[in-house]
Image (cartoon, rainbow, N blue to C red):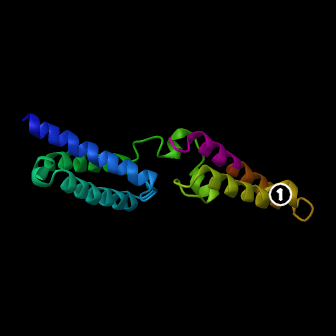
Amino acid sequence: MAIIAGGVFAAFLIGRLVRVVLLRLKVIKGGSSTVNGAINDLILTYLITLGVIMLVARWQARLFIPGFVVMVIYDIARLKIAARGQFAADDPRQSGAPDDPYTILGVHRNDSLEKIRQVYRKLQATYHPDKHAADSSEASIKQKTEKIKQINAAFQWILKNHGT
């Protein structure tokens, strides 16, 4: 029994380490905004994990299979919970943020903060009402003011919550 428990723990640990390495190397995105993207990331992680297990424990790989199964079940449960939107951090609308700050700015959740800042600055230059006050009507200035408020709120929310 202790050998099986050790195999479960070792396989789960190897799987998590493979995932961390793939995330660091930016091979997978981790926390993909779509379920299909997350499933693709997990499948790649599983394949590499099985390869590592086969290399490490050639003749005793069967001891790691229960741990691999536990890892798959854990990830499926995590995906189902995330798909239902029960994590407030994954759903900006539950956290008091604007509709979807990433959509408002036109960036992806996995983009670096530096890229998000660059996009924010471009949007500021495009929509700021003071930059186009001379050649715009009153309605246009009001519309741009509302848009810039949305952009600022989205950017502030992303600064506060990005990477959490």
| 76 relative to 157 in the view: left or right | left
| Residue drawn 52% across the image and 44% down it | 163
Q: Which image quarter: residue 128?
A: bottom right
| Residue drawn 87% across the image and 54% down it | 130
| 110 relative to 126 in the view: left or right | left
Furthest-right residue in this view: 134
Q: Position of residue 148 (x, y in %)?
A: 74, 52
| 84 relative to 72 in the view: left or right | right
Q: Position of residue 49 (x, y in %)?
A: 26, 54
Does the segment drawn in magenta span residue 94? no
Q: Where is residue 125 in the image (x, y as percent from the top left)?
A: 79, 58
Q: Which image quarter: residue 2?
A: top left
Does the segment drawn in magenta span residue 154? yes
Q: How many labels does the image show?
A: 1
Q: Mark 1 points at which residue?
A: 141
Q: In which quadrant of the rendered image does the N terminus lie?
A: top left
Q: Disc 1 marks which amino acid?
A: Ile
Magenta stretch in the rendered image: 152-164
- Where disc 1 sits, the SS reads helix
| Residue drawn 35% across the image and 50% down it | 19
Nearer to us in this view, 73 or 126: 73
What secondary structure is the stretch in magenta mostly built from?
A: helix
Q: Which image quarter: residue 137?
A: bottom right
